[in-house]
Image: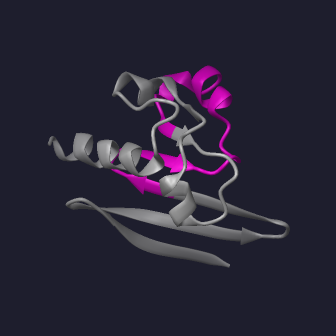
Amino acid sequence: MVRIEPIRIGEWTAVGVEVLLPKTTLLAVTAGDGYIMCGALDVHLLNERLRDRKVIAGRAVGVRTLEQLLEAPLESVTESAHAMGITAGMKGREAVRMMAAAASGA
């Protein structure tokens, strides 16, 4: 099953996606040109093999719901996310807010 949910963060609306798979759940929240995701995200792959795409993303581990993803500290972030001020240890909600703000020019 796939569930898509609008998530208000400040003045912006992000999109939460939950994909129920056998024995695991994939979680992602996207805003602007970036996203945060559960531990399934391979930040190393994005930074190394897909560097030319300049993906803005962060990874949180040990989360099981979209709300946990937003409240958890990011375990790692891509180089492009770091370049815009998103850092490991930052809560997912703050990272998504920064992604939305950057996309809107705020």
Give the number of marks. 0
**Which image quarter is the N terminus in?**
bottom right
Question: Does the stretch in magenta take in 36?
Answer: yes
Q: Residue at x 52, y 39 (%)?
A: 58
- Vertically, is 90 above or below 65? above
Q: Residue at x 45, y 74 (%)?
A: 5
Q: Residue furthest left?
A: 106
- Vertically, is 61 above or below 28? above
Q: Residue at x 38, y 22 (%)?
A: 83
Q: Is residue 61 left or right of residue 34?
A: right
* Relative image position of residue 103 (x, y in whole percent): 25, 44
* Relative image position of residue 7 (x, y in whole percent): 38, 68
* Relative image position of residue 66 (x, y in whole percent): 54, 64
In-front residue for pair 51/12:
12
Q: Residue furthest right?
A: 23
Q: In the rendered structure, which segment of residues is drawn in magenta?
A: 29-57
Q: Residue at x 54, y 50 (%)?
A: 72
**Which image quarter is the C terminus in?**
top left
* Relative image position of residue 12 (x, y in whole percent): 25, 60
- Vertically, is 63 above or below 43? below
In-front residue for pair 80/70:
70
| Colouring scheme applied when the structure was drawn | one colour
Q: Is residue 65 left or right of residue 93?
A: right
Question: Does the stretch in magenta take in 65?
Answer: no
